[in-house]
Amino acid sequence: MSLQIERTVTAVWRLESAKIIAHVARITRDVGVAEELAQDTLLSALQRWPSEGLPDKPAAWLMTAAKNRALDHVRAEALHARKHEELGADLDAQQAHIVPDFVDGLDAARADDIGDDLLRLIFTACHPVLSTEARTALTLRLLGGLTTAEIARAYLAAEPTIAQRIVRAKKTLAAARVPFELPPADQRSERLASVLEVIYLVFNEGYSATAGEDWLRPALCEEALRLARVLMGLMPDEAEVLGLNALVEIQASRLAARTDREGRPVLLMEQDRSRWDPLLIRRGLAALQRIAELRQALGPYALQAAIAACHARAVKAADTDWDEIVALYDALCQVSPSPVVELNRAVAVSMAEGPAAGLALVDELVAAGTLDRYHWLPSVRGDLLAKLGREAEARAEFEKAAAMTANERERQLLLARARS
């Protein structure tokens, strides 16, 4: 296969796979089958395009081919059911998908207040029949197009563990006959935490890719932003929905400043803040204001959004209110404790009280051993050691972090810091 075709297939699949799986799942009513059919379609493209040439619209080709496979699957299932006299009460619904025009008509007829296949896919995969870990892993696989290895890194877990979790989740959904549909409004709240987590993890993968040659994956950020906005329209009085929206809006405002012209990472304190998007900041601050008006307790996303807002309000990096950020991290540690939050708090403490204070907290995390797989731990420790003039120790920490990351841009940044 030529390099050009391989790159095109990879790029198109990353952008379109979630939409294709969601559309096929709407037809088959089975997310596991939908993923298999979508993967079959990708394989067909990989076999045909090198000899036949790229189609004019690769994404449309993949969607049409996947949809046809889904319809063939439904026809075969219906025929099989008739032959064995096992056609159940849902036969009419299944047959509805045999004719494409009727599929579209049916979809329009039962249009709901979301009207979005991707968001419907998230709510389906976040069904209570699955554990929280299984819900997020499955949805990231289906929606975010993340590989099993990328999901494993996001959760600081072993890759086989995540792979087994995804397989079991699909089998559980199929065995429970979970329909591909939106839950009623009064049942959405019980799935909300997983839905929010998935959207934010998709955004984070776009904001700081766990692997590959690029540090950013803007298409994932844009998709997460869109879903967060749709969700906010659906649940406008839910503080954590508003909090997630505020968080991703403000963080997305920095995307243009997060890399230089060569695609190299630019860290927060070194960014040209004139390149931050003021419209996205205003949208994020408006969502935070709405949370204040609701007078609800701040949850994890609202608190993280408040921290992001502290950075957004600082015209210069030196203007950052680190005491306020430490206070917000203290609150975050109370409502959503985790070693990663503790590490971020240590960074804030180092900025407010000096690197020695931050290093003491980081060393506690090193001793606990809970972040042994997390490359940002040695990276942060290296930064604090460098500020304290302990150059040799700092170099060793940066080299350790560089060896742990699977992102090439990040690895280059860490090695550059080790050499400086």
Image: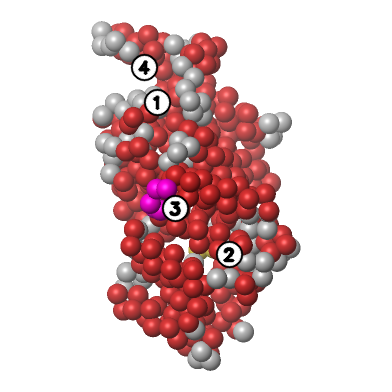
Is the residue 227 above or below the residue 209 in the image? Answer: above
Q: Amino acid at mark 2?
A: His
Pointer 1 residue = 181
Q: Secondary structure at mark 4?
A: helix
Q: Amino acid at mark 4?
A: Glu
Relative image position of residue 377 (x, y in whole percent): 43, 73
Q: Residues within 10 Å of mark 1 (few under 14, many from 20)?
A: some
Which comes sooner in the sequence, label 3 or label 2?
Answer: 3
**Which quadrant is home to the C terminus?**
bottom right
Q: Residues within 10 Å of mark 2 (few under 14, many from 20)?
A: many
Alpha carbon separation for disc pair 2 and 1: 39 Å
Q: Residues within 10 Å of mark 4 (few under 14, many from 20)?
A: some
Viewer-nearest of discs 1 and 3: 3
Which comes sooner in the sequence, label 2 or label 4?
Answer: 4
Magenta stretch bounds? 295-299
Q: Residue at x 49, y 19 (%)?
A: 111
Pointer 4 residue = 77
Q: Secondary structure at mark 2?
A: helix
Q: Amino acid at mark 3?
A: Tyr
Please indicate whether residue 215 sits to the left or right of residue 55 in the image.
left
Viewer-nearest of discs 4 and 1: 1
Residue 301 is labelled as 3
